[in-house]
Image (cartoon, coloured by chain):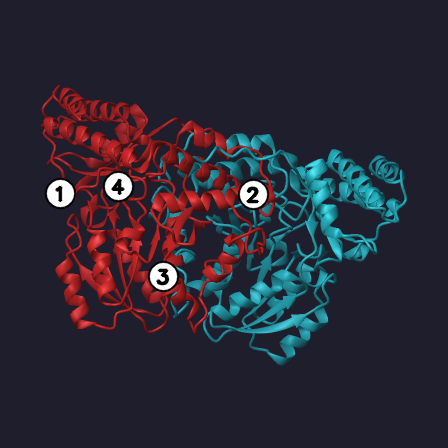
Chain colours: A red, B cyan
Amino acid sequence: MTSSFYPPQRTLMGPGPSDVSSRVLGALCRPTIGHLDPKFLQLMDEVKALLQFAFQTDHALTLPISAPGSAGMEACFVNLVSPGDTVIVCQNGVFGGRMKENVERCGGIAVMVEDTWGEPVSLDKVEAAFSEHPKAAIVAFVHAETSTGVRSDAAAICALAARHNALSIVDAVTSLGGIELSIDKWGADAAYSGTQKCLSCVPGISPVTFSDRAVERIKARTHKVQSWFLDMQLVMGYWGEGSKRAYHHTAPVNALYGLHEALVMLEEEGLNASHARHLRNHRALVAGLEAMGLGMAVAPQDRLPQLNSVLVPEGVDEAAVRSALLEQFDLEIGAGLGALAGKTWRIGLMGFASNERNVLFCLNSLESVLKAQSANITSGAALSAAQASLSAA
Amino acid sequence: MTSSFYPPQRTLMGPGPSDVSSRVLGALCRPTIGHLDPKFLQLMDEVKALLQFAFQTDHALTLPISAPGSAGMEACFVNLVSPGDTVIVCQNGVFGGRMKENVERCGGIAVMVEDTWGEPVSLDKVEAAFSEHPKAAIVAFVHAETSTGVRSDAAAICALAARHNALSIVDAVTSLGGIELSIDKWGADAAYSGTQKCLSCVPGISPVTFSDRAVERIKARTHKVQSWFLDMQLVMGYWGEGSKRAYHHTAPVNALYGLHEALVMLEEEGLNASHARHLRNHRALVAGLEAMGLGMAVAPQDRLPQLNSVLVPEGVDEAAVRSALLEQFDLEIGAGLGALAGKTWRIGLMGFASNERNVLFCLNSLESVLKAQSANITSGAALSAAQASLSAA
């Protein structure tokens, strides 16, 4: 016989999932109701409005896809890319590569704009790609690269796409709630996110938004969307306006209770306050890490406050450090991915997990583990540097 | 400002979601841990083993897709259907039509075998379809049609597919846990289910299983699976054997806590005991409904114990009855779908919701609402008939 599963109580400071507040966990386990219950339709309307607030958009087609961020990405591509379309894909980390896969599986042609991992997307290279491919239908890029901790200039890339009469697809998985994401002001046409990053909800749902221009493109399709589950014209029938809803799939009812609560918390705090909190805790963490003698992998102006790529010191076994943090302190931080595997750690300060307690706990724990591994670090300076930064902010 | 959402406490006797036990709700809100945490990998291994038990299979490729049943369906089709493949699709309700959509969006040719809604799939017609299309690659059918409450002979259809060297795809959304589902004994090649029916977990996850023969077919593909998110070769890298797991997507951690607990409960009860419980409560419900003077839409030998299609009496406004049940008794039952819309109600007795209390509560509530609507029913006989049936069983 299998026993019930009781997870340990971790502190989640990796690339997501991030710590989930007890308010969200408490919402998750409220009694399940039907996916067509009038009370549930009311919840759906509130979730849509809250997502419009979070994305800073009036787009009518703004809703949560009933699957993780990878499916939200796929929803954007399968609905907007038709066979034969040229799509400019910017890659400066893991997730650009995944976009390429999506484009090609839709029968599109991916024109890659490659930048070094750890640096932002180069606007000049995107402009050059348009010179070579003036008929490109779409530009796709990652706003906040979770694999490297880099922020790209989403406003400028969206503007560039619009100037070339192309749609923009924005990977906002790690940006939503943590840094400015102004879909309407920037003129972004499609964006997808996840619930387990700066919204600090449990993983499993992907908020998406599509502009009217994107919806026109979808309605004008002559080739059926290859995914039935992610076909936005069908999904709209269930999530659409009013009390008339066509059954499409059974919504993940309790997961949406959780998302609703997480968004209510974001609304209560306010977007600007949330962004300021992320920035303040990031600065304190960096001050502490640098006082310890550790270096950051990303240039200051390109750093994401919610995802901090730290250089692993010479001679240190990075995996052993992560294991020790998990075993001794129940603290999860992330490994580097792809080109940065083995070279960086990724320390998340996302959503509910972005707080002073976590900053100080992480610095203390990391210092203790690094000392045990005889790493060449400066002892006893991190905490006061972080505290000074917090006091100054 | 938006307020927190507090759902009403319903009794869920529709076509799913069904009532969720407090054990499963309690598991959902345990602390979130990382999707690559060693403790989470242990949970994943247990979930796979428990699903093998539930599906009665040794298939190594048995796991939960991180999205609802509709995505599980799509996972089976996008991985097994290559462009140009002929697929025999049996339709005797809503979900056969959805299978056809899936086949066509994969570039396959759907050969439809149509049966009247409310009747099982005809083996003779499937045989005839093979005579016309001897090269058909796949037969797809619904084991337990949620839209009508009909059980088809899955063992016979799978055997017929094997005889013609075709793979079988079984929609087991409503059957898993409620009636016999013997994947290995029947030689089924692929099956998908949902969590919110007879497993009585919250909606949002889709257990799937693929035979070795199906896995060979997937590995031999020359055309990439059109869905990146549902590409089983990539999903396998995360759910595969041992401690080496490649990140694919972020698993819905807390939803999997819930599924694990629901499966532990099924293991504790035992499959045979669960099937017997479903049958016993079904017989009591039907005894009560018939004593009230209501008729069933499906012939006795074809009925699903977990989903009971009841004929709406002449002159009764079926939607008003459902609304009254919801408003006065917090009781959800389902409407008829498609060809049966307006003609039937669907009363679920699924998983945790299949219990004596619900049978008696539903009969009492329905009698009260029908009397208020001046329907021509026999009063005061339903409860004793149901109780007699329960005592006799």
Q: Are marks 2 and 3 on the same chain?
A: yes
Judging by the rendered image, the residue that carries numbered circle 3 is A77
Q: Amino acid at mark 1?
A: Gln
Q: Secondary structure at mark 2?
A: helix
Quadrant where the N terminus of chain B lies?
top left
Judging by the rendered image, the residue that carries numbered circle 1 is A301
Residue sitting at x 28%, y 27%: A355
- Residue B158, how many percent across, how many down? 63, 63
Residue A252 visible? The answer is yes
Protein chain holding label 2:
A
Residue sitting at x 87%, y 45%: B292
Q: Secondary structure at mark 4?
A: loop
Q: CA distance from mark 1 to mark 3?
A: 30 Å
Return the disc, 1 or 4, that comes first in the chain's sequence.
4
> As drawn, is A365 to the left or to the right of B333?
left
Return the disc, 1 or 2, that comes first in the chain's sequence.
2
> As drawn, is A390 to the left or to the right of A326?
left
Judging by the rendered image, the residue that carries numbered circle 4 is A179
- Residue A230, how many percent across, how many down? 45, 58
Q: Is residue B301 above or below residue A317?
A: below
Q: Amino acid at mark 2?
A: Phe
Protein chain holding label 3:
A
Return the disc, 2 or 4, that comes first in the chain's sequence.
2
Q: Secondary structure at mark 1?
A: helix
Q: CA distance from mark 1 to mark 2?
A: 43 Å
Judging by the rendered image, the residue that carries numbered circle 2 is A40
Q: Are marks 1 and 3 on the same chain?
A: yes
Protein chain holding label 1:
A
Residue sitting at x 47%, y 68%: B106
Q: Amino acid at mark 4?
A: Ile
